[in-house]
Each structure stands twice: as structure tokens, then as C-alpha cells.
Image: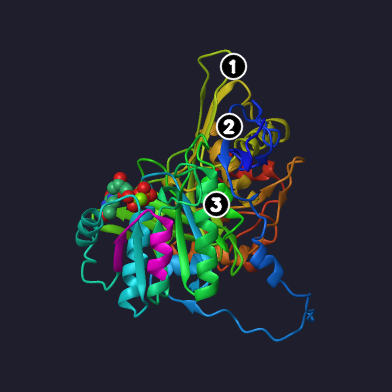
Amino acid sequence: MARDGATYVCQSCGAVQSKWAGQCPACNGWNCLVEEIQSRPPGALAPSRATKMRGLAFETLDTQTIPPPRIMTGVDEFDRVCGGGVVRGSALLLSGDPGVGKSTLLLQVCAQAAVNGARCAYISGEEALDQVRGRAARMGLAQAPVQLAAETALRGIIDGLKRETFDLVVIDSIQTLWSDAHEAGPGSVTQVRAAAGELVRLAKTRGVAVILVGHVTKDGQIAGPRVVEHMVDAVLSFEGERGYPFRILRAAKNRFGATDEIGVFEMGDSGLREVKNPSALFLNSGGERAPGAAVFAGIEGSRPVLVEFQALVAPSAYGTPRRAVVGWDSGRLAMVLAVLESRCGLGLGARDVYLNVAGGLRISEPAADLAAAAALASSALDVALPQDCVVFGEVSLSGEVRQVSRMESRLKEAAKLGFSRAVGPMGIADVSPFPVSGVGRLVDAVRRIGENDWT
Ligand code: TYD
Ligand code: MG
């Protein structure tokens, strides 16, 4: 029999149950329901707040609205991903794997914003003040007028933030906070939800922008950030492949801006450096292009980005050929392979296929189909694409090459970086800054590559 006020919260999806069970009915995970004592069910309003609610007031859709005031932090890549600066009175979650550079990024954002005149606080629950100071000194930010504190008690943080006026507050991280109103341990869903709830309320009532840091683990063990995603106005994720210095900041949700924008940074000895021209970074510069390499002219958010697709088609040593892909969708790889096989007569079925997107970037555009196909065909036929050639276009199951969005921007970016040839859909001839003819079907593209025919 459940104790009074006891609920069972799933630690992997956050669902709340009134009875314990071995399997969570919401996400079907095993052994993830943990008893938590709560004074009232989550989401229920306290009586004082409930009675304060008044009747609805309706307005029309065309009522004049003023754009929300924003804080430009001065870290341009960060500001752009936020939709043009951080909105005052909004709450933002920055999630990412441990060690990817969240603390480094936010310390830099805080310091830069403080230098530009914003009143900024950085509250660390993970590192001691000396550690944060040491890092700031290494990054050359020691002189920035940032208010620093090390605290994990939610009550202490809220009281402290109410005593002073801030424009921007960073909480690093939400998983370390604990509220004495709940019995559960720090990092549990109950604590994370309680802390995020209080901090979001503080952001709204006092007009301060609050940035919460949340760790995600590969096996999704800590459900904290998932629960917080619904409560905040924007969710940014910070990603990077191990072994590469590049870090990508992506908006996964943004109530005040677009969600397809990316910011690119490079991790160095003195912190993160903004990369204003990502194309130059992701291109394998210098030397001849090897067979199996194709430069994809992509669009990430509002910007064109050139990135190299690398493919290797090799004889298979085993009965079942291997397929491995990094930076692209394995489902789409399977589709492109099938189209190459059945529409272009390229026998890849019994061979190992490896596909890699250089630089650690993850590509999700359908426009990359043709680039992947070109890289695969180039490797299979052992013919290199010309050094100055970019590729883009969507490939349909029938083997057609379809038009994609913003073809002119893609080609202009390519031209800017010295490219003067392109393999793409039929429409490219009309919008290209250099003379080029499109291909209607994938088989035509493969023929061009095979015959090295670029006239
Ligand atoms: P950190 O910001 O602490 O990661 P997170 O807060 O996401 O856990 O960054 C940790 C990594 O970044 C660490 O492996 C060291 C590296 N790093 C640098 O390479 N250069 C630097 O200037 C800094 C501050 C960190
Ligand atoms: Mg950290």
C-alpha cells in the first residue's frame, strides 16, 4: 500500500504512477520506477495560486505585439542559434554529453555579455570557485565582471538571485541542484523538475534570462533534461564527435526563433573559438581529391555549408557485407545503395560499404543523397571527382534526381570557395553563377563520374 503522498516516478521518462510496478507503463522500461514523497501531485497548483486565477480574457490574432527584448551576448554563433540574442525573461536549456564543453561555452557567453554591459551571474554546482576561476584565467576572461557563486541548494540560489538584479544567469548544472522541499536525491526527476520549475518562474517574474545546463548520458540514464525540455522556452544541444575539435550548437526547440540554425565552434587551448566560415573547416583542404570523396553543398540553418562525404567500397571478407556510416542516416544509405544497385547497375550488394562525413558534422538533409551516391560511385568505379566539383540533390527510389531548396545559395557558396563545377538536379543551370548542366537521373550522374565527362 502506497504511503500518503507517495508517487512512483519513472527515472527514464518522467511519468508519474500511483503504484509501483516492475515495468513503467509509459515507456516500458524495467526497474525505473522510484518512490518519491511529494506534498502534492506534480503539476497541481497550490491553493493560493489556483484561487488567484481569473476568467479568460480573449484577444484577436492581429493584436499588435512588440518583439521580445533580447540580450546580445556578443558570442555571435550563440546569439544566432538563440534567434538573435537571448530573450529576457526566458529560460533556456543547454544539453550535451559530459565533457563536450558546455561549461566552457557558457562561461565564455557570460564573460562576453558582462563585458558588453549585461549583469551576469554564473552559478556552479559542479566545480569549485577556484576551478572556474582557473579556467577563466586560461581563457583570458579573468577580468570580465561576472558574478560567480558555487551553490547547489535551490533555496539559497533563488534567494540570492532575488536579492540582486541580473540580466543573465547561468546554472551549471540543473542535475546538481536540490530543494529541501523534496526527499529525493539530486539528479532525480523530482528534484530536477522542482529546480527547473522554480528557476523558470524566477526568469518570468523577474525578467532575467536563465540558462540551465543539463547533462545527457548515452544510455539516457538521467531523465532530468528530458523533463526540463517541456518547461523551458528553448533547448540548445551542444554536440561534438570525440577526437574532433569541432563543436556544433543546435537549437532543438526555440519559442523565439528558428530551430534549424547551427553555431560552429572549435575547441582549443584557450576555450572555444567561433568558426565564422564553417565550409573552409569541414573541407579536406589541399591535395587532389581521392576516389570516394564528394563535396556536398549543404544548408545548415540559414547558412550554406560545404562538407566532404567520404566513401569506401571494398571487397567483403565475410559472408554478410558490412555497412558503416558516420554523420549520416544509415536508412538513407541503404536506400541510396539500393538505387545505385537496381537503377544504375552498380553491383555493391556483396561489398563492404563505409561512409563518413568529414569533420564530425551530422547531415540530415535529403539533399545529401546525391553527394553520398556520388562518393559511393566514385569509390566503386575508382574514379576521383574533379577537385572543383560540388554535389547536391535528392534521389528518389525511382532513381530520379530531384530539386532541393536554396540551390542558388549552395552554388554561390561553392563559387565563393573556388568551385566551378557541380552535379545537381536539372534546375541548377538556371541559377548557377558558373556554367553547369543538371542531371535528371542518378544513372546520368554515375555515367558522368565513370567517364570523367564534365563538359
Ligand atoms: P567542459 O566545458 O568542462 O565540458 P562540460 O561542461 O560539457 O562537461 O569542457 C571539458 C573539456 O573541454 C575538457 O575535456 C577539456 C576541454 N577544454 C579544452 O580543450 N580547452 C579549454 O580551453 C577548456 C576550458 C576546456
Ligand atoms: Mg561542466
Amino acid type, callout 1: Thr
Image point (64%, 40%), residue name: 4
| Percent coordinates x, y for residue 78 in the rendering | 44, 65
Q: Can you tell which mark lies on residue 193?
A: 3
Which residues lie in the magenta part? Answer: 147-161
Does 26 lie within the magenta span? no
Find disc 2 in the rendering and name its residue: 32
Q: Label 3 neighbourhood size at 10 Å, few (<14), some (14-19), many (20+)?
A: many
Q: What whole-number distance in Å separates the C-alpha atoms at marks 2 and 1?
A: 37 Å
Judging depth in this view, the residue of 182 and 237 nearest the camera is 182
- Residue at 62% of width from left, 84% of height from top? 66
Count neighbours of disc 1 (C-alpha within 10 A) and say few if under 14, some if 14 to 19, many if 20 or more: few
**Who is closer to the viewer here, 137 or 382?**
137
Q: CA distance from mark 2 to mark 3?
A: 17 Å
Q: Residue at x 69, y 61 (%)?
A: 427
Q: Amino acid at mark 2?
A: Cys
Q: Identify the image quadrant of the C terminus.
A: bottom right
SS at circle 2? loop
Residue 439 image position (x, y, % from top left): 68, 51
Mark number, residue 320: 1
Q: Quadrant of the N terminus?
A: top right
Q: For the residue marked with disc 3, what is the amino acid?
A: Arg
Q: Nearer the viewer, mark 2 or mark 1?
A: 2
Residue 156 lies within the magenta run? yes
- View extreme (top): residue: 319
The number of numbered badges drawn on the structure is 3
Identify the residue at horizontal 62%, vertical 63% (top origin): 407
Q: Is residue 295 visible?
A: no
Provide the secondary structure element on which disc 1 rests: loop
